Image (cartoon, rainbow, N blue to C red):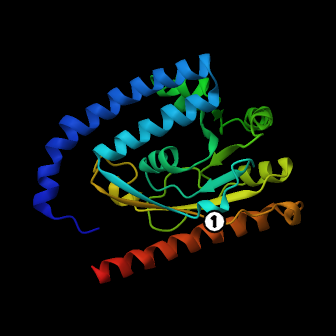
Amino acid sequence: MNRPFLFWLCYQPYKWLVLYPFMVLSTFFFAALAILLASTVSQRLGSMIAGKYWARVIAMLTPMSVDLQGTEHIDSNKSYVIVSNHQSLYDIFVLYGWLPVDFKWVMKHELRKLPALGSSCEKLGHIFIDRSNRTRAIATLNEAKQRIVNGTSVIFFPEGTRSLGKGLRPFKKGAFHMAIELGLPILPLSILGTRDIQPAKSFDTYPGRATMLVHEPIPVEMFKDNVEGLMTEARQAIAFGLGEAVEESARNQARA
């Protein structure tokens, strides 16, 4: 990404003195709101209201704009196993702020210990999984299956962690096993541009534009005995979407 040095330099005081402190304060505020709504009204309302506005406020302050495409592939009355590539912390803001789906995260159990965020995620019914203990992880996923009904979906980052390069990391099979066992379609997503806003394992935040492409759901019926085939199909959809988005971005820059 081409970053004009003078603008980047001027952005640094704003980032450290305004954006990051507000991120911390807003996380505590919206976490408290999420807990209140989940406790008094419903988990779905707490997630969709507090999560959405938390993400959008941070995006506005960064600033980050989001181009969402493919929402015609979503049926709000259906549940999905959603899989997405993972480039940046800002993927979370894109998903919470713009994906029109009620969903549960599958996240590392270490995140439960984070102040405010961990307790609010637990109250909202998100799924903490201990990857170091396979038996416990399987038991957690089996318990979580009861929550993925009536239009509530579950999101996985099948790469397992944020990618440091431009390519996709190898996928883990957990999301695809769950989809087959529950008979739920896979909904692949491609997110592009967030690495330029904040690379993995970096504080080099910078304004930018993100794109999220929602692909056609993949029915699992034909993959009941072929989890590898289902995983390959989803991976190809996500990779193709990333390539499409790169080409579209290049065309837009050329026209500008």
Indicate whether 31 appears above or below 212: above
Residue 252 or 84: which is nearer the viewer?
252
Q: Residue 154's image quarter? A: top right
Q: Residue at 42% x, 49% y: name it.
A: 90
- Percent across and percent down for residue 93 are 45, 45
Taking the spot 48% from the left edge, 23% from the top edge, the residue there is 33
| Residue type of the residue flagged with mark 1 | His
Name the spot of residue 117 as percent of width and height, x first: 48, 28
Is residue 17 found left or right of 56 in the rendered image?
Answer: left
Q: Nearer the viewer, residue 232 or 102?
A: 102
Please indicate whether residue 187 sits to the left or right of residue 9 in the image. right
> On the rendered structure, is 176 left or right of 222?
left
Q: Is residue 131 above or below residue 64?
A: above
Give coordinates of residue 114: x percent, y percent: 47, 26
Q: Is residue 135 left or right of residue 108?
A: right
Using the rendered view, name the quadrant where residue 57 is placed.
top left
Task: Tell me the residue at 33%/26% (across/down).
Answer: 25
The N terminus, quarter of image: bottom left
Helix, strand or loop status at disc 1: loop
- 80 w.r.t. 55: above or below: below
Crowding near the residue tagged with mark 1, few <14, some 14–19, many ≥20 C-alpha atoms within 10 Å: many
Q: How many marks?
A: 1
- Tell me the quadrant of the picture where the C terminus can be found: bottom left
Residue pointed to by mark 1: 215
Residue 184 coordinates in the image, percent (x, y): 80, 52
The image quadrant that residue 229 belongs to is bottom right
